[in-house]
């Protein structure tokens, strides 16, 4: 029996989208420039703070702190990161339930950088027809070599600039930039720059829509978050197809009345919605997992409807529920579902708790541990000694001096050496060894006492401790 050979992988057909004008394209472009401005300029934004570089956002790995405007985050604040990741995930689910893959279409890094690469491509190679012509030309064509070569050099520069900017977040940007170009930076800076340059170039210049289709998991599990009321880009099939399907606007089919009599809908089968799609799908084939809800097909179709003098909205943001009605109503965001309300409540509660926790963070952290090897020591004079380890971490933003004392002990029983008053720099920790020595009579009546820690502003914490005289 003969078997037919089949390829396991289909050959990639490059997507060469056409540019389009419209409200969604303007919104995407505005977000692109805003995002680039924030990302590339933030490391250079000055922010005065005591005891730290004057940089608005800096991830100080050697100093074990993250400087984010007026907030300093330390490793012990890992709970904040957990909350932030939870909020980001729930926000993604919340937006998806309401607006489909709006995050992918407008805010995702892959989308933003791919848009920028396509902008450079159009700048150096021209509009879609010119790029298609170049694509079909052999590499021996001089024009193709020059234009494609210049385009890829520009991609490389943008990729390198992207990677370099990321590295600048991990040090004082002016000094780190000089050290990188004078070959005095740590090896990690060069490795990271190289890795991100290559990955950015591959993702935004080579793989493009394949990242969204095959690599990103969000595109795969998004269907579990869609509801029939979810707003996303849809083609109004009944209006566009009619009874006889799509038809070009040829002689005898140029007005809506002529098309209606012939059984055709408003879609003139121009294909512009396919040409502008950055992932190369045909929105007229229904909801597809590759669609990133960018709305460019809406702009394209509205442009054609305007030229024909027909109502807009043949391709529009709408829900499956509304489109299934005999007469679709106005487009509305349907938020009254248990899933959406649950996401919203979770977002509000977790965001409020995060801000509350940040606002009410203590100016210093402390811990007191009893040294248990041995639990107590009997001295030669019969007195009993317990030892304790006190750890102080300064989170105030300035250098602070902490005073330590004890309550519930006889005079002179607490021995701190020379550390009754301890200066601690911002973000640093100190460990103080303390001992308590009591006579047998005093030890017999002392089970508990309290350590008292005060900072220079008068803030005070009291920590209970035990005194052991037997195992």
Image: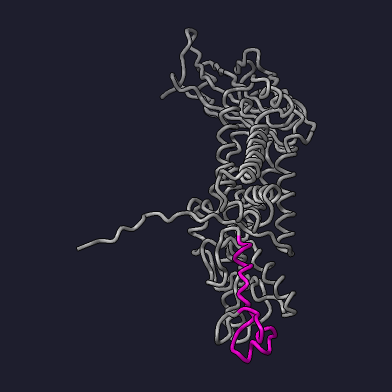
As rendered, which of 253 and 423 lies closer to the eye? Answer: 253
Whether residue 372 is visible: yes
* Residue 139: x %, y % from top left: 56, 44
Answer above or below: position of 81 versus 220. Answer: above
**Majority secondary structure in the magenta region:** loop
Side of 307 relative to 408 (left or right): right
* Residue 453: x %, y % from top left: 67, 27
Which quadrant of the view contains residue 143?
top right
Whether residue 341 is visible: no
As rendered, which of 234 and 283 lies closer to the eye? Answer: 283
* Residue 313: x %, y % from top left: 68, 75
Side of 149 relative to 54 (left or right): left
Of the 4 image quadrants, the one containing the C terminus is top left
Which quadrant of the view contains residue 100?
bottom right
Answer above or below: position of 232 versus 464. Answer: below
User: Residue at the location (69% across, 47% down)?
Assistant: 124
The residue at the far left in this view is 1
* Residue 268: x %, y % from top left: 63, 77
Of the 4 image quadrants, the one containing the N terminus is bottom left
The magenta stretch spans residue 254: yes
The magenta stretch spans residue 78: no
As rendered, which of 396 and 471 lies closer to the eye? Answer: 396
**The magenta segment:** 248-277
User: Residue at the location (64% across, 73% down)?
Assistant: 315
């Amino acid at each position: 029996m003969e078997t037919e050979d089949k390829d396991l992988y289909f050959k990639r057909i490059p997507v060469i989208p056409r540019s389009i004008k419209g409200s969604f394209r303007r919104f995407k472009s505005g977000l692109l420039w805003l995002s680039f401005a924030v990302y590339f300029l933030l490391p250079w934004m000055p922010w005065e703070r005591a005891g730290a570089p004057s940089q608005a956002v800096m991830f100080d790995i050697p100093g074990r702190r993250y400087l984010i405007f007026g907030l300093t985050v330390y490793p012990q604040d890992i709970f904040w990161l957990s909350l932030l990741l939870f909020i980001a995930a729930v926000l993604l689910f919340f937006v998806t339930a309401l607006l489909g893959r709006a995050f992918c279409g407008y805010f995702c890094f892959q989308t933003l950088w791919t848009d920028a690469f396509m902008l450079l491509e159009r700048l150096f190679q021209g509009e879609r027809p010119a790029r298609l012509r170049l694509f079909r030309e052999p590499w021996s064509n001089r024009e193709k070599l020059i234009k494609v070569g210049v385009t890829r050099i520009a991609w490389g520069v943008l990729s390198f600039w992207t990677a370099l900017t990321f590295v600048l977040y991990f040090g004082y940007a002016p000094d780190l930039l000089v050290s990188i170009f004078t070959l005095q930076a740590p090896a990690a800076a060069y490795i990271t720059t190289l890795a991100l340059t290559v990955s950015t170039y591959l993702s935004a210049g080579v793989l493009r829509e394949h990242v969204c289709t095959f690599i990103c998991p969000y595109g795969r599990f998004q269907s579990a978050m869609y509801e029939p009321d979810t707003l996303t880009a849809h083609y109004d099939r009944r209006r566009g197809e009619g009874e006889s399907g799509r038809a070009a606007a040829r002689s005898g089919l140029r007005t809506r009345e002529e098309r209606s009599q012939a059984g055709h809908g408003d879609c003139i089968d121009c294909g512009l919605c396919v040409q502008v799609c950055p992932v190369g799908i045909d929105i007229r084939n229904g909801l597809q997992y590759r669609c990133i809800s960018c709305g460019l097909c809406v702009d394209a179709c509205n442009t054609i409807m305007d030229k024909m003098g027909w109502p807009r909205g043949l391709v529009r943001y709408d829900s499956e529920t509304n489109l299934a009605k005999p007469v679709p109503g106005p487009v509305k965001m349907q938020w009254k579902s248990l899933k959406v309300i649950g996401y919203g409540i979770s977002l509000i509660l977790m965001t409020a708790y995060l801000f509350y926790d940040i606002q009410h963070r203590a100016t210093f952290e402390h811990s007191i541990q009893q040294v248990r090897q041995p639990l107590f020591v009997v001295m030669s004079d019969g007195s009993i000694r317990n030892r304790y380890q006190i750890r102080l971490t300064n989170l105030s933003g300035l250098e602070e001096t902490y005073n330590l004392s004890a309550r519930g002990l006889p005079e002179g029983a607490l021995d701190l050496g020379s550390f009754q008053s301890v200066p601690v720099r911002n973000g640093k920790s100190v460990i103080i060894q303390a001992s308590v020595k009591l006579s047998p009579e005093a030890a017999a009546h002392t089970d508990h006492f309290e350590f008292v820690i005060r900072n220079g502003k008068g803030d005070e914490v009291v920590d209970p401790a035990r005194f052991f005289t037997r195992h």
